[in-house]
């Protein structure tokens, strides 16, 4: 078995090497390299090398390719339809080599020579192409190369990966009646002096001019600024004052009502003083009765005296 394998390998090598010596008078076979496109640095992609002999019968192939090793890294190589190879496909320097045959078979049309897996190394445009030392061996004519000599090439655009930028965290707006911690941001403000002042976290940067404080401007009533500023909103102030006055009035009325009720209750609780009537003795009572009884007689006597 080893003898047969060595013999077949020798024959294949001989076929391929002999084919490089003499070119066909009317070559029709050609190479093709697929996989052209755009790829991201760090990712891998596959390139397929094939030959097309049309109706011409072939049984061996030698495909030698060149590439830029600074842009592409070969990670794997595999053979195709030409299954008998004296040596495994190899990559050395900037060159990739396939030398295989289809013993006992005559192939026509399109057949895969081999497959290459590359890893993109640098962001640039690069290519993979066939060298002039390549050959497609005729199956019927000894020492004849049917390759038309036209170099095949694949073009590849290698792009840098897009780095995702984190979304900045928005600084929360201060709320009424509370405060928020200062954000770690830098800003430039302009004071009454008209000079810009750069600050970071509320601290002026060294060398920058400190702006003089400006007098706040009272916004017009009903404006958005006035409605958002409780300290200068006249309408809100009037409403609060009116509510306070109404509350005080109700409190005073309640106090007066309570005082009146207390006074009324105190009067009802005091005992009623009964007037003291002096006691009438029996003598005094009888004398009074006699006096009353004598009054009509006296009046009659006076009347008679007047008539006389």
Image: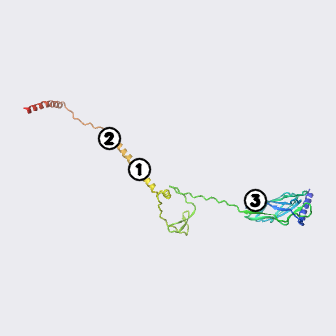
Residue reaching furthest to the bottom: 207
Q: Nearer the viewer, mark 3 or mark 2?
A: 3
Q: Nearer the viewer, residue 176 or 153?
A: 153
- Point 41% across, 50% down: residue: 246
Q: In this figure, which colouring scheme has been used for the structure?
A: rainbow
Q: Which residue is disc 2 drawn over?
A: 267
Q: Nearer the viewer, mark 2 or mark 1?
A: 1
Q: Are marks 3 and 1 in contact (CB under 8 Å)?
A: no
Kindly indicate the quadrant of the structure image that contains residue 189: bottom right
Q: Mark 3: few, some, or many residues within 10 Å (few <14, many ≥20)?
A: some
Q: Mark 2: few, some, or many residues within 10 Å (few <14, many ≥20)?
A: few
Q: Which residue is disc 1 drawn over?
A: 246
Measured from the top left, where is residue 161 in percent x and y? 70, 61
Image quarter of the C terminus: top left
- Residue 174 marker: none
Image quarter of the N terminus: bottom right
Q: Which residue is disc 3 drawn over?
A: 44
Q: Secondary structure at mark 2?
A: helix
Residue reaching furthest to the left: 308
Q: Nearer the viewer, residue 292 or 21?
A: 21
Separation of residues labelled 3 and 2 (CA atoms): 107 Å
Label 2 vs 1, first from the N-terminus: 1
Separation of residues labelled 2 and 1 (CA atoms): 32 Å
Measured from the top left, where is residue 91 in percent x and y? 82, 63
Q: Are marks 2 and 1 in contact (CB under 8 Å)?
A: no
Separation of residues labelled 3 and 1 (CA atoms): 81 Å
Q: Is residue 266 left or right of residue 155?
A: left
- Point 32% across, 40% down: residue: 267
Measured from the top left, where is residue 122 in percent x and y? 73, 64
Measured from the top left, where is residue 13 in percent x and y? 89, 62
Q: Is residue 214 left or right of residue 99?
A: left
The answer to whether any part of residue 246 appears in the image is yes
């Amino acid at each position: 078995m080893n003898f047969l394998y060595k013999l077949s390998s020798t024959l294949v090598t001989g076929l391929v090497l002999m084919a490089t010596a003499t070119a066909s008078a009317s070559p029709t076979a050609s190479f093709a390299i697929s996989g052209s496109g755009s790829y991201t640095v760090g990712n891998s992609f596959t390139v397929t090398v094939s030959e097309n002999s049309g109706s011409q019968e072939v049984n061996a192939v030698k495909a030698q390719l060149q590439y830029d090793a600074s842009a592409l890294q070969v990670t794997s190589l595999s053979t195709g339809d030409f299954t008998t190879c004296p040596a495994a496909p190899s990559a050395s320097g900037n060159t990739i080599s396939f030398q295989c045959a289809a013993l006992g078979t005559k192939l026509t049309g399109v057949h895969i020579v081999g497959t290459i897996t590359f890893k993109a190394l640098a962001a640039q445009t690069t290519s993979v192409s066939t060298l002039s030392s390549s050959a497609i061996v005729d199956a019927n004519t000894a020492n004849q190369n049917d390759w038309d000599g036209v170099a095949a090439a694949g073009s590849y655009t290698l792009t840098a990966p897009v780095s995702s930028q984190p979304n900045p965290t928005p600084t929360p707006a201060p709320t009424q009646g509370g405060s928020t911690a200062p954000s770690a941001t830098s800003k430039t403000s302009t004071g009454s002096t008209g000079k810009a002042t750069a600050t970071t976290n509320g601290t002026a940067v060294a060398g920058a001019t400190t702006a003089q404080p400006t007098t706040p401007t009272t916004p017009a009533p009903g404006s958005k600024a006035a409605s958002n500023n409780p300290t200068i909103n006249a309408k809100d102030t009037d409403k609060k004052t009116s509510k306070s006055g109404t509350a005080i009035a109700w409190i005073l009325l309640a106090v007066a009502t309570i005082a009146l009720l207390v006074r009324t209750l105190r009067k009802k609780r005091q005992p009623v003083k009964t007037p003291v009537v002096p006691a009438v003795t029996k003598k005094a009572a009888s004398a009074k009765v006699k006096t009353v009884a004598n009054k009509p007689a006296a009046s009659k006597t006076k009347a008679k005296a007047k008539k006389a």
